[in-house]
Amino acid sequence: MAGLGSLDLNLLRVFDAVARERHVTRAAERLNLSQPAVSNALARLRHALGDELFLRRPGGVEPTALALSLAGPVADALDRIGAAISAQAPFNPAATDRVFPLALSEYAEAVLAPPLLARMAEEAPHALLAISHADRTNWEALLEGDGAVMAVGVLPEPPALYTRLRLLPEGFCTLMRADHPLAEGELTVERFTSVPHLLHSPNGSRSGAIDEMLAEIGHTRRLGAVVAHLAAVPDILLRTEMIMTLSSRLAVRLAETHGLALRDPPVAPRHTRLSLLFHRRFEADAGHAWMRRLVLAVARGVEPPSGLQTGPELME
């Protein structure tokens, strides 16, 4: 195996692109190179490292054990170099055409994306916000790869390589159609659990925040349906006996837009808190720092719902 001194470090960009894409043609497109140029670079790397690195498979390539062991360190090194260079260059939001890939939960997207895009239109009109979905199951994979440079959602405690910035706290409300039997009268736990519930769960889980609270007082609820996306929620509630408990800001918005009844749930759910997570390799990146500040400013400006139940906040 060749030593580092005899290795053309430009080849590492090719290695990184192929390792991420698992496809030579897509890697070439990513690098704005021809496919023969990428294939030639891989041949030079194979010779220098004494390993096949990537084996052809239907639909792409498969990394060897050596390639798998190198992928993380190479990606981290290239990101650090890029961040160091970016840190030295001034960042001008008004002139940048940078793409900011953010991973947001569906709730974070609904609450934060509209005001964030409005601010970007004023401060960075040529920049692009590219949003992908994030939840507890995939946020780290997105940030470890190049799927996103930051993630926002109700996310677990991250490893030490990540920084967490806490955003806005949130409570819960219960939605139902305006003529639902539970829209009037005292909403006791017994009445609350007597009807089917609609659960929003992008990752397919059948347990929500309210289930833990009910279990603590010896009750359970019956699910009528689990949906992956919020778009269908209002129509489902309007057509069925189901009720739904979800984050207050979004519940208020859906109630106002679709004429739904809004009630406090009979248990006192702990508040959850959105967090912004990012890898520390972006700490000194001026553009990344600008976007972080913008997200924090937008979150601070989001008005809390009024007249709704409050309770102890759950600090993640």
Image (cartoon, helix red, strand yellow):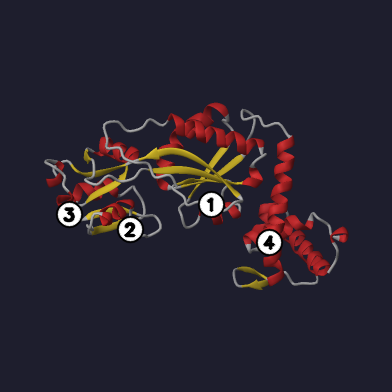
Q: Which mark is residue 207?
A: 2
Check disc 3 and give the amino acid type.
Val
Check disc 4 and give the amino acid type.
Ala
Number of numbered discs visible in the structure rendering: 4
Residue drawn at (61%, 39%) of the image = 288
Q: Is residue 244 left or right of residue 228?
A: left
Q: Is residue 95 left or right of residue 312?
A: right
Q: Which mark is residue 71?
A: 4
* CA separation in Å, label 1 and label 3: 37 Å
Q: Is residue 66 left or right of residue 97?
A: right
Q: Look at discs 1 and 3 and give the one toward the viewer.
A: 1
* Label pair 1/3, CB-CB below 8 angstroms: no
Q: Which residue is mark 1?
A: 158
Looking at the picture, does residue 122 appear above or below residue 244?
above
Q: Which residue is mark 3?
A: 195
At mark 1, the secondary structure is: loop
At mark 2, the secondary structure is: loop
* CA separation in Å, label 2 and label 3: 16 Å
* CA separation in Å, label 3 and label 4: 51 Å
Looking at the picture, does residue 280 appear above or below residue 137?
above
